[in-house]
Amino acid sequence: MAATTASKMFKLALIQLRVTANKEANILRARSKVLEAAKNGAKVVVLPECFNSPYGTKHFPQYAEPLNGTTSSALLSMAKDAEVYLIGGSFPESSSDGSSKFYNTCTIWSPTGTQLGVHRKVHLFDIDVPGKIRFKESEVLSAGDQLTMVETEFGKIGVGICYDIRFPEMAMIAARKGCVAMIYPGAFNMTTGPLHWELLQRARAVDNQIYVAACSPARDENEAGAGYVAYGHSSVVDPMGVVVGTTDGKEDIVYADVDLARIDEARKSIPVTSQRRFDVYQDVSAT
Ligand SMILES: NC(=O)CCC(=O)C(=O)O
């Protein structure tokens, strides 16, 4: 596992945003929350999955826009004006190559407004839990085909979107390539949220001895036409698996002090990183 540049601390903020059907209002509200988080000392700020639109296959084409559209320019300004690293949630992206494809896309910005990365959700959310929830992102969306890791002054950060968290390989590869954290804009639901949302974050954190954070929209059971109720509970988990910041379902900003020294502490006390048996099984990060 690559060495981390420990000993730095920074404040992370997760904006658990109340998302409505009004795209412009969502973007403006996100902006005011990002500025508020920065005022409160956050250096890395995260928005939720589909922060500018309701989450649902019927909504994606209606709200989709190109990568370099108005949402991206709003995110650029937010990052620059707040002087923060911004993991810009996600929005439905319409491809600009004439293919009429749509993606669920996260853009990542530096405090000077440089685009550091673009993550297109790699694992599409296609599930069917009988009598509870059926959802098929692949009816409308295409999957991304790249892992995303961005360099920041605090170390390398890996980014996934929601269902991506269920695939441990992604976080494992990121950690072995030196990431200090995996951050997932996400929107679990009222069936799988209580079951798996925190469990998966803690698992990815403990597996890899890194920080893990997941940022959801606020829960809104009354939002007209939304049809999908987000679980909320945006949280931050430390490298020992301790939840160091969380909330309930309502709109909120979750703050957590990320102390990179805790990564080395965890790896020294429980040295799984140096005890792996690549003579017995394969290293998924070796490709
Ligand atoms: N938006 C998503 O990918 C939802 C993932 C989810 O709820 C799950 O259980 O996984």
Image: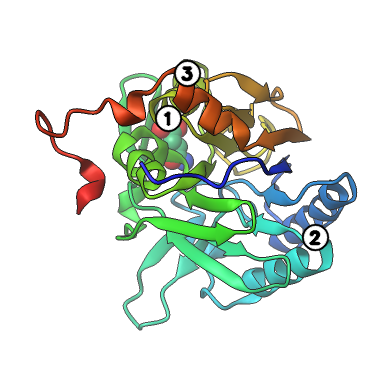
Q: From the viewer's perspective, is residue 83 above or below residue 4? A: below
Residue located at (45% from left, 56% from top): 149
Report helix, strand or loop for mark 2: helix
SS for callout 3: helix
Residue 193 visible in the current orientation? no
Q: Distance between the residues labelled 3 and 1?
A: 18 Å
The residues bearing labels 1 and 2 have C-alpha atoms spaced at a distance of 33 Å
Pointer 2 residue? 28
Name the mark nearer the viewer: 2 or 3.
3
Point out residue 240 in the picture as x, y percentages from the top left corner: 52, 21
Indicate the quadrant containing the N terminus: top left, top right, bottom left or bottom right: top left
User: Is 253 left, or right, of 120 in this rendering?
Assistant: right
Q: Residue furthest toward the right? A: 39
Q: Which of 15 and 242 lies nearest the eye of the viewer?
A: 242
In the rendered image, which quarter contains the C terminus? bottom left
Labels 1 and 2: the sequence-earlier one: 2
Which of the two labelled residues, at mark 2 and mark 3, occupies the earlier sequence position?
2
Residue 214, compared with residue 100, is above or below; it is: above
Direction from residue 203 to residue 252 in the image, left or right: right
**Which residue is denoted by mark 3 in the rendering?**
269
Q: Residue 204 carries which label?
A: 1
Residue type at the position of mark 3: Ser
Circle 3 or circle 1, nearest the eye: 3
Q: Are marks 3 and 1 in contact (CB under 8 Å)?
A: no
Disc 2 residue type (three-letter): Leu
- Residue drawn at x 80%, y 60% as measured from the top left: 28
**Cβ–Cβ under 8 Å for marks 2 and 3:** no
197 or 157, which lies in front? 157
| Disc 1: residue Cβ within 8 A of ligand 1's nearest atom | no
